[in-house]
């Protein structure tokens, strides 16, 4: 029976409503909610992991210059395990390589190759695939000061550069790496190092690593300075004294090659200069306007350079030089200077010559400047290189602009 007192107190016109039954949550809704929360939790855990479940294979790209061997003078390391992708590639050990376990895939005649390389600690995953561009060649800069034993033979006056048994040349192995990109390229060679100890030290310390250094064979402590230069990243050439006009009143120095000497006498003097140090890519004339214009005198010199795998850099001071034709005939990489940058020893004059080099490089792709290790030249070149790089000019080693008959 309904409560009478409650009915009396209720406002008129309002009927009595039955009490609501409590709602029940179905088991299906509960299960769906649990599934959604679980998916969100797992997704968050995956997103916050340091390493995903599937990690893509790491690929290292190398543009360092090297011959078909890779870091031939580097310490031999044990081959790392192959990746699955690398194990499927066909190929053979690179010619003459001292690094065991390296495999290549690609054309044997040139172009980029894929090489599975053992890697040093901290330089990538074991067995990483390295894309190796054979259009650029060269020695690892960390060991650039160490002579490659395969490129050295004993001479009467010291070690002489020679082609390795597998065909590698000092020109290739001791070349400084560069980008290989197209664009305005400027090569600068600063000669006369090792004559002044303080001047040599300053030049090596101040000049950007891309600048090529030329050593005078009459200098002192050339081996020590060579190591310092190479450890600093410089490519180097050896200067050879050749007979100028008005010789001996104008004298390039000890053991000058002359037109009246026999070929054997000149080769003996040449080998003396070559034996003064190691790890250089070629030679550059010091004077020599008369000698370089005489085919009978110049021919044996070029033949010797071709046999030893060295380049010839002509400083461009003589328009009568036969060096370009003789270099091509004997398979010698060749480069010629476009201008002597410090003929006038004045900062403004040197900067003007350097700007001319840049204009030439933008017009024909590259240009070569030759200078001496005067304090003024070193300081001016060092500051100019910094600004030239900002303008998009690439400063390259002399080997990068040499015409190489062996590469076509």
Image: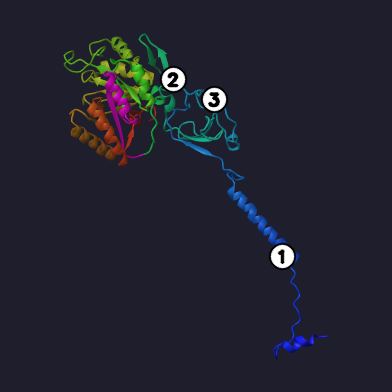
Closer to the eye: label 1 or 2:
1
Closer to the eye: label 2 or 3:
3
Q: Give the range drawn in magenta.
A: 182-211
Residue 28: % across, % down: 74, 64
Is residue 65 visible in the rendered image? The answer is: yes
Looking at the image, which residue sits at the far bottom?
Answer: 12
Determine which residue is flagged by label 3.
77
The question of residue 19 being in magenta is answered with: no
Residue 275: % across, % down: 35, 14
> What's the CA distance linking mark 2 and mark 3?
17 Å
In the picture, the quarter occupied by the N terminus is bottom right
Residue 301: % across, % down: 31, 17
Q: Which of disc 3 and disc 2 is earlier in sequence?
A: 3
Q: In this view, does 142 lie above or below 273?
A: below
Determine which residue is flagged by label 2.
148
Q: Which of disc 3 and disc 1 is earlier in sequence?
A: 1
> What's the CA distance linking mark 1 and mark 3?
62 Å
**SS class of the residue under badge 1?**
helix
């Amino acid at each position: 029976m309904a409560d009478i007192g409650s009915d009396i107190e209720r406002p008129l016109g309002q009927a009595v409503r039955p009490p609501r039954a409590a709602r029940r949550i179905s088991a299906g809704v509960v299960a769906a909610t649990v599934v959604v929360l679980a998916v969100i939790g797992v997704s968050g855990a995956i997103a916050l992991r340091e390493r995903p479940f599937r990690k893509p294979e790491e690929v290292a790209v190398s543009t360092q210059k090297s011959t078909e061997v890779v870091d031939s003078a580097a310490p031999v390391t044990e081959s790392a395990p192959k990746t699955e992708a690398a194990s499927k590639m066909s190929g053979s050990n690179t010619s003459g390589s001292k690094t065991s376990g390296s495999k290549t895939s690609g054309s044997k005649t040139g172009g980029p190759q894929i090489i599975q390389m053992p890697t040093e600690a901290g330089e990538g995953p074991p067995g990483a695939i390295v894309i190796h561009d054979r259009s650029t060649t060269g020695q690892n800069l960390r060991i650039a000061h160490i002579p490659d034993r395969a490129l050295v033979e004993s001479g009467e006056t010291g070690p002489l550069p020679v082609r390795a048994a597998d065909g590698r040349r000092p020109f290739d192995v001791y070349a400084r790496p560069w980008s290989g990109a197209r664009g305005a390229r400027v090569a600068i060679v600063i000669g006369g190092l090792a004559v002044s100890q303080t001047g040599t030290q300053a030049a090596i310390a101040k000049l950007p690593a891309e600048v090529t250094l030329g050593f005078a064979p009459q200098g002192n402590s050339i081996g020590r300075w060579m190591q310092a230069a190479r450890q600093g990243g410089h490519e180097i050439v050896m200067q050879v004294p050749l007979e100028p006009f008005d010789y001996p009143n104008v004298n390039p120095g000890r053991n000058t090659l002359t037109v009246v000497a026999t070929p054997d006498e000149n080769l003996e003097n040449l080998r003396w200069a070559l034996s003064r140090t190691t790890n250089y890519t070629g030679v550059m004339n010091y004077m020599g306007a008369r000698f370089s214009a005489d085919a009978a005198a110049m021919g044996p010199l070029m033949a010797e350079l071709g046999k030893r795998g060295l380049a010839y850099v002509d400083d461009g001071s003589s328009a009568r030089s036969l060096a370009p034709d003789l270099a091509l005939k004997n398979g010698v990489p060749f480069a010629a200077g476009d201008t002597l940058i410090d003929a006038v020893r004045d900062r403004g004059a040197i900067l003007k010559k350097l700007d001319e080099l840049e204009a030439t490089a933008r017009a024909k792709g590259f240009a070569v400047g030759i200078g001496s290790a005067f304090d003024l030249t070193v300081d001016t070149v060092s500051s100019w290189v910094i600004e030239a790089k900002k303008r998009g000019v690439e400063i390259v080693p002399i080997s990068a602009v040499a015409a190489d008959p062996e590469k076509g």
